[in-house]
Image: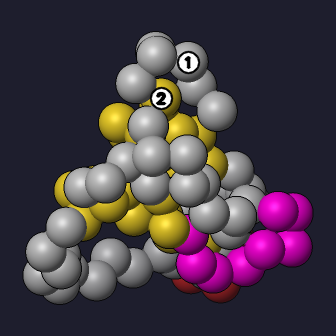
Amino acid sequence: MRKFAVLLAVMMTMLLPVASAVCSEIESGRTAIGAGVHQNCILTSDGNVICEGSNSRGQAADYANGDAMGVASGHSHNCVLQSSGNVH
């Protein structure tokens, strides 16, 4: 029974989707990338964040206040670190 459980666990992990990273050159003026499950965001040198991908939960909305210093992305959300220290 134990061998069956191990085999089943291995087979189940093979069926789950796996995120793959694609490395490419960042265009000039882009300073950071936040990679989520279904969306990605790019911090630009002018303090804005450009997002693309799924927007099923509003997670791909751009941030254009010009005060972004950092960006992080998760499963279905993004966070922007503002120059004031606040997180949006």
The location of residue 33, given as percent across then percent down, is 34, 60
> Does the segment drawn in magenta span residue 86?
no
User: In which image quadrant can residue 59 be found?
Assistant: bottom right
Residue range highlighted in magenta: 51-58
Kindly identify which numbered label has been placed on residue 82: 2
Q: Residue tagged by mark 1? A: 86
- Name the one closer to the observer, 39 or 3: 39
Amino acid at dot 1 = Asn
User: In which image quadrant can residue 71 be found?
Assistant: top left
Residue drawn at (31%, 54%), measured in percent from left and top? 46
Residue drawn at (39%, 79%), measured in percent from left and top? 20
Report the label total.
2
Residue 35, can we see it?
no
In the depicted structure, whether residue 21 falls above or below residue 72? below
**83 sits left or right of 80 in the view:** left
**14 sits left or right of 46 in the view:** right
Q: How would you classify the magenta stretch by its main secondary structure? A: loop
Residue 86, can we see it?
yes
The location of residue 48, given as percent across then percent down, is 44, 55
Snapshot colouring: secondary structure
In the depicted structure, whether residue 28 falls above or below residue 42? below
**24 sits left or right of 84 in the view:** left
**45 sits left or right of 4 in the view:** left
Question: Dot 1: few (<14), some (14–19), or many (≥20) neighbours within 10 Å?
Answer: few
Marks 2/1 in contact by CB < 8 Å: the verdict is yes
Amino acid at dot 2 = Gln
> Does the segment drawn in magenta span residue 53?
yes
Residue closest to the far right: 57
SS for dot 2? strand
